[in-house]
Amino acid sequence: MIEITAEVRAAIDRAAGDMELAGDEYIEPADGLIHCKKCHGSRQTVVPRFGGSGYFMPRCLCPCQQKAQAERKIMEQQRERMERIKRRKAQGL
Ligand SMILES: [Zn+2]
C-alpha cells in the first residue's frame, strides 16, 4: 500500500465511480477506498501503474474475508480426509 497523496486520492476518487460495492462494503471517506463493514479492513489497495503514470485500485481481501477463506480451506481439507477414510472403509481396508 502506497502513501495516499493528493494525486493518489484524485485517482482513487476518479475510479470510485466505476466501482460496484457489495452490500457489506462502503467507501471510507478518509482514504476513498472500499472497506468492509464487518471488520473495517481495506478491500481495495493502490498500486502505481507500471511506467509511473497513474494507479491501479485492485480489489483485495479484508481480514475477515481472509479468515473466512482460510477456514473454508481447512473445512475442505477435513472433508477430503473424511472422504478418503470413508472410501478406504468401503474398500475394506
Ligand atoms: Zn472484513
Image: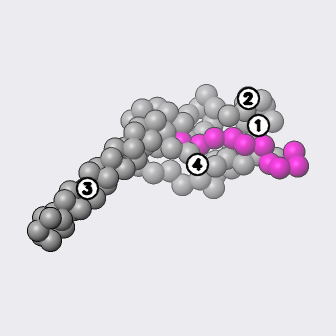
> Which residue corresponds to the image point at 61% horizontal and 28% vertical from the top-left?
30
Which mark, by number, is residue 3? 2
Mark 4 closeness class: few <14, some 14–19, many ≥20 residues within 10 Å: some
Q: Which amino acid does label 4 sit on?
A: Arg
Q: What residue type is labelled 2?
A: Glu
Locate residue 4: give its quadrant.
Answer: top right
- Pointer 1 with pointer 2, Cβ within 8 A: yes
Above or below, 91 against 62 in this view is: below
Distance, label 4 to label 1, CA atoms, is: 16 Å
Q: Main secondary structure of the magenta part?
A: loop
Front position in the image: 79 or 68: 79
Earlier along the polypeptide chain: callout 1 or callout 3? 1
Distance, label 3 to label 4, CA atoms, is: 33 Å
Residue pointed to by mark 3: 81
Earlier along the polypeptide chain: callout 2 or callout 3? 2
- Pointer 3 with pointer 4, Cβ within 8 A: no
**Magenta region:** 43-53
Earlier along the polypeptide chain: callout 2 or callout 4? 2
Residue pointed to by mark 1: 8
Q: Which of marks 4 and 1 is in front?
A: 4
Q: What residue type is labelled 3?
A: Arg
Earlier along the polypeptide chain: callout 3 or callout 4? 4
Q: Residue farthest to the bottom?
A: 91
Question: In the image, 90: left or right of 36?
Answer: left
- Residue 36 appears in view: no
Rendering coords of residue 86 (x, y %): 16, 63
Earlier along the polypeptide chain: callout 1 or callout 2? 2
